[in-house]
Image (cartoon, helix red, strand yellow):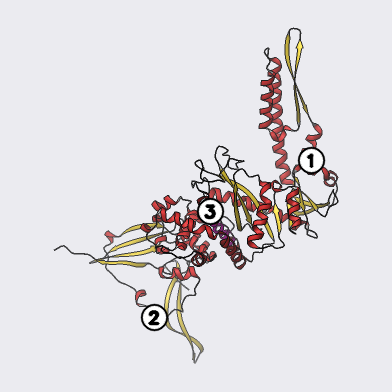
Amino acid sequence: MRKKGGAEYESWTLVETVRTARGPRQRIIATIGKLPGLNKEERMGWEDIGRFLSGKPRPHPDLFMPEEERPLWATVDLRGVHVERMRHFGDVYLGLVLWHRLGLSEFCKEEIPHGREEIPWQVMTAVLTLARFCAPSSELQIAESWYAKTALDDLLGIPAEKINDDRLYRALDALLPHKDALCRHLQKRYGELFGTTFDFLIYDVTSTYFEGSGKHNARAKRGYSRDGRPDCVQVCIGLVTSSEGLPLAFEVFDGNRVDVTTVEDIIEIMESKYGKANRVWVMDRGMVSEDNLETLRTRGAHYIVGTPKSMLKKFEWNLMEAGWEEVEPGVEVKFASSPDNTNETFLLCRSQGRKEKEQAILNRFMSRLETGLIKLKEQAEKSRTPDRQRVERRIGRLLERNSRAASLFDVSVEERVAGTETRLCVTIKKQEERTEWALHTSGSYLLRTNCQGRDPKELWKHYIQLTQAEDAFRTTKTDLGMRPIYHQTAERTEAHILVCFLALVLWRTLQQWMESSGLGTAPRKLLEELREIRSLDVMLPAKDKKIRLRTVSTATPDLRILLQRLKLPLPNRPKIIENVVQTLAV
């Protein structure tokens, strides 16, 4: 290690130990090279990218540099130096690293049959997924602008003019038949990379809507929209993840399908495609029905599910008793026996933070509803031309807008005759007992399971992992641009969702990678940082030629630290891609 000009440098040298009159000493045989002290990443050129992506070991360096790595000297006219062909490099490079680490390139190469296609399907599938992962784009936008703005032509070896929308659409058609094999491959790869087990499966349902009528898709129907678009047709998507939130499989259902009716189908599909095992299903209360639970018990499966809030009434005394066990600061749990003397176990949970939040929300709705009812009562009773139906409609709308507190008030409207006039009398009665119970049970919820002999902390922690599925939906819709869907056929729609599923796989894998490297779990921020790394061509006008050096911009010191923690080297040796002798005018 040496210092020169305030900067630290590492010198790589080959030495041998020799005996001298003053003892053993080291003698330098050859100096191999230097690296800036702040950049301890692997020295890698463009020719090494394929080796790094494939995971092949680097050959042992020779003592003498090969011909192409020897220093080249040229006299350059500094007035003509300029930069050309700036491309996004960092984000697509990271996505391609994840693609190879998950073995998706080899999977597509082996599984998708080869035909007469000019560009291999595994390359086109990678393009579709990387575009969805880095900058969500339609197939048309990928072909017209996005691909040409990235360094993928260098990384994949496919020029931009070969990427067109028809080829991308055909890649969707080629990928879709291999969906089940792909999900099996990912399950195996998760185990190899992260040691993931699949004892606990988290299941949840969301919906996504279409732009257009969707008349060519039998599953596109109007239903309950999680996106706030009841005016559009939609499909429902059931997603199965591991307890870490790693996507395992998905199924597409009709847009008007009720969540609770999908459970039996998804269990049968998972068992038929991926084998029957002693799994524990974790589901929210929206999936729960007695028929579904009976189906799980009949199949020998276990479950941890939420229950309706109304069921807490059966455990009123248990809520008052002691015996709570803290699972984390502010959260307590305790077992309660089944009120129906079944083999099920009920787990009472209460959270102080959740209690404060729910009470604040309930108080706000109660205050708003009570204020609105009193104002409406005064207006109705003062009116000289009372319209009872109109007043009742206004009360109904007010209760609907404040549905959280609607059950805590009883409102009645009566007509009373006073002399020659008819007046309306609006009676508002607040149910004090219901209000007290609602405030008391705020922050409390009930879990139901047939898992015997489990620690209550373990059961609670597995149920809380449902937030992983909810976060996966948010990521897929917001960061990966799954909605709206523009494809109009059922096959293209499912293929589009499959590409979004693969992009989610990359996203979650990056989260696991970052977490194991001590970098948190925010892929969005890392991608934003890496987008600033560009590839570019530096044009050097020499005496009788132009030298074009293709290089990658240097990362900032902070980003360099992140890359070192991820063990993700960037190409840091330029590549001469043109050395053209200029034609001299006669």
Tell me if I can see residue 528 in this picture: no
Circles 1, 2 touching at the beta carbon (< 8 Å): no
Report the disc number at residue 64.
2
Report the disc number at residue 440.
1
Q: Nearer the viewer, residue 325 or 169?
A: 169
Query: In 3D space, how far apart are the residues under numbered discs 3 and 1 (Cα atoms)?
Result: 43 Å
User: Residue furthest toward the top?
Assistant: 420
Dot 1: within a 10 Å radius of its alpha carbon, few (fewer than 14), some, or many (20 or more) residues?
A: few
Q: Helix, strand, or loop for circle 1?
A: helix
Q: Helix, strand, or loop for circle 3?
A: helix
Q: Nearer the viewer, mark 1 or mark 2?
A: 1
Image position of 426 with respect to 241: above or below: above
Dot 3: within a 10 Å radius of its alpha carbon, few (fewer than 14), some, or many (20 or more) residues?
A: many
Residue where numbered disc 3 is placed: 500
In magenta segment, residue 265: no
Query: Which amino acid type corresponds to the residue marked 2 in the rendered image?
Result: Phe
Mark 3 vs mark 1: which is more N-terminal? 1
